Image: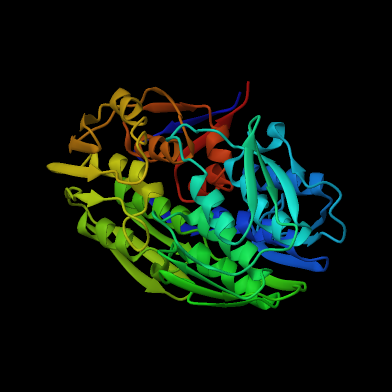
Amino acid sequence: MDRIRIVGGNPLNGIIPISGAKNAALPLMIASLLTDDTLTLENVPHLADVEQLQRILGNHGVDISVAGRREGHGSSYARTLHFTARTIVDTTAPYELVSRMRASFWVIGPLLARMGECKVSLPGGCAIGTRPVDLFIHGLEALGAEIEIANGYANARAPKGLVGAKYIFPKVSVGATHVMLMAASLAKGETIIENAAREPEVADLAKCLNAMGAKISGAGTSTIRIQGVTSLSGARHRVLPDRIETGTYAMAVAMTGGDVTLENTSVDLLETAIKAIESAGAEINSVENGIRVRMGAGRIQPVDVITDPYPGFPTDLQAQFMALMSRADGVSHITETIFENRFMHVQELARLGARISLSGQVATIEGTLMLNGAQVMATDLRASASLVIAGLAAKGETVVNRVYHLDRGFERLEEKLTNCGAIVERVSE
């Protein structure tokens, strides 16, 4: 099993290209099931989750071809992928595939809309909480689907097709909003979604669906209207930049000091997080085709944050911000409101010398001047990034184990950091 070895203490200086967003690429790939024409996606990151979803879509009969290499790099990334679901050969998404990646459950929307039936394994829980799929089920039932849960599967039928309706989400859900957008695009009549997720990835999916012939308005707000159409065509769409990767590297610069330009991204994607990083002492400015992050010689300042659905502070940056606050000049507080078990990185940060106490969903971080390298264990994708950030600033050597979590969401992390002066290497056993 691979590990990442980090020797901390070097400020980051240089340029880091930001990849396409994983959280946008996955629903966009799944949208290919809605049409028998070819959907072409540009700027698709080369990640383990993307590779797994390719296998899942292939199981349904999607033909996938890959093209695109960035000049000067040995292996492909920022790829262009072509998806053609001319014939759906299997409407079952089996447990052995869905259990490996939660987002694969989202195929239930387009399969049901296009084929009128499907059988999709329930994804189960995950390391950061139970994350139930009831919002998905109730939303599709509002569109006329008949769904029976039996033997670990959602057996869904819409023999007369889906029909537009008004549905109010009792709780904001990005995944369920994605599924409703895809399903309602082929439903008869108008669908109105209230309390919809407002994340940029939702708006990106709607933009792609509209390019395919859907009629969606209001994406990016809490009210989305979808006028159903009888069929969708192919399209070409570029995946938006990864705002979580953007925030992660911005925090790494603030943590270590230095001056880095994050290319191919925008402050507009994560304004709340940018403000928090600036409050911690970093100077962040928009530049041509990116963001420049600079950290002066002063101590990191303590900042309190509360995670919230977009446009609030992202839960996917909570662990990374906790690492940053571990070296602040004072006490900070982080309140997690999205997932109930998303503090598992606390004990690993403590191994590096972080002083963190928990009370329910509130973490209190007492900043310390110096962290010290140690062996640590990644528990999930975003937690693993927090350990890398901490390791970059820690004295001595840090070894992050279980880095397969990182490979799910960060493209070429070691290369990007090394090019900016960090001492980071992957160690394979």
> Residue 379 sits in which quadrant?
top left
Residue 65: image x %, image y %? 82, 57
> Residue 79 sits in which quadrant?
bottom right
What colouring does the structure picture have? rainbow
> Residue 244 sits in which quadrant?
bottom left
- Point out the residue furthest to the left here: 330
Q: Is residue 67 visible?
A: no
Residue 161: image x %, image y %? 72, 63
Left or right for 286, reference 182? left
The residue at the point 38 percent across, 39 percent down is 386
Q: Nearer the viewer, residue 223 or 142?
A: 142
The residue at the point 19 percent across, 37 percent down is 365
Quadrant, the N terminus: top right
Left or right for 306, reference 6? left
Number of marks = 0
Residue 107: image x %, image y %? 67, 51
Residue 338: image x %, image y %? 35, 46
Quadrant, the C terminus: top right
Position of residue 419 relative to residue 363, above or below, is below
Q: Nearer the viewer, residue 383 or 425?
A: 383
Position of residue 217 relative to residue 265, above or below, is below
Position of residue 333 relative to residue 125, above or below, is below
Q: Is residue 215 visible?
A: yes
Left or right for 408, reference 230? left
Q: Nearer the viewer, residue 72 or 220?
A: 220
The residue at the point 77 percent across, 74 percent down is 233
Q: Nearer the viewer, residue 398 or 10?
A: 398
Left or right for 171, reference 417? left
